[in-house]
Image (spheres, rainbow, N blue to C red):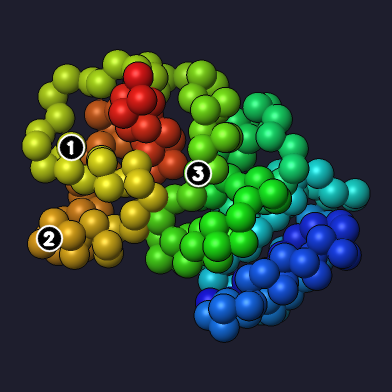
Amino acid sequence: MRVVLADDEPLLRAGLRTVLEAGGTVRVVGEVSNGDGLLAAVDRHRPDVVLVDIQMPGTDGLTALRLLCTRADAPPAAVLTTFDLDDYVAEALRIGVQGFLLKDAEPESLVRAVRDLAAGGAVLDPRITARLLPRLAAGAASPGRRPPGLTLRENQVLGRLAAGKSNAVIASELDLAEATVKKYVSTLLVKLGAENRVQAALLAQSWRTG
């Protein structure tokens, strides 16, 4: 799996590279120190996943991600930061970022996150999830209140989506075609009033813990 890192601290990038490449399944193909460099690195290296710091000099991470996520061929992106600030994370969710991680995550968690993102899943650090639930975008179903009208199969798909699983994995576990799972996910987004699968996963997690 090919990864591009965007962070303005060279020592931190070096540490992340070491952690990610230790197992032999991830290769960091590009490193940049600001948002301007991120878009150029994505075009140059065509990574499977990008990990982006929020606060960087010049063009910040959110600005770069806002541009990147509008592209039809954009790779999955995760915010990787020490700043677990609600406003930043909520904005990243609205942009369409698929992952939210803190830099002090365990090494195995980072590698697993890259694998899950590359497979099309969602990645949510529990510490960020707990803070983000109250700030879901307007119009989504209220945290803590499961909406009526979900079928058994929709609940099965939603439970796996909440666990960050990709459509391919959900299809395998439920013995469905991947295209069928994609239709279920689209239906769930409409029923939940969610803008994307990460927001739907957050709502489902709130019902699980509420």
First along the sequence among labels 1 and 3: 3
Near-viewer residue (67 or 138):
138
Name the side, left or right, on which 142 lies relative to 167.
right
| Amino acid residing under circle 2 | Leu
| Amino acid residing under circle 1 | Asn
Picture coordinates of residue 54 (x, y %)? 74, 45
Rendered view: 36 above or below 43: above
- Location of the C terminus (image quadrant): top left
User: Mark 1–mark 2 contact, CB under 8 Å?
Assistant: no
Residue under label 1: 155
Q: Residue at 72% of width from left, 65% of height from top? A: 16
Measured Cα–Cα span from mark 1 to mark 2: 14 Å
The quadrant where residue 75 appears: bottom right
Picture coordinates of residue 55 (x, y %)? 81, 44
User: Mark 1–mark 3 contact, CB under 8 Å?
Assistant: no
Rendered view: 103 above or below 176: above
Residue under label 3: 124
Near-viewer residue (109 or 65):
109
Q: Residue at 49% of width from left, 25% of height from top? A: 133
Residue under label 2: 176
Name the side, left or right, on which 6 lies relative to 70.
right
Dot 3: few (<14), some (14–19), or many (≥20) neighbours within 10 Å? many
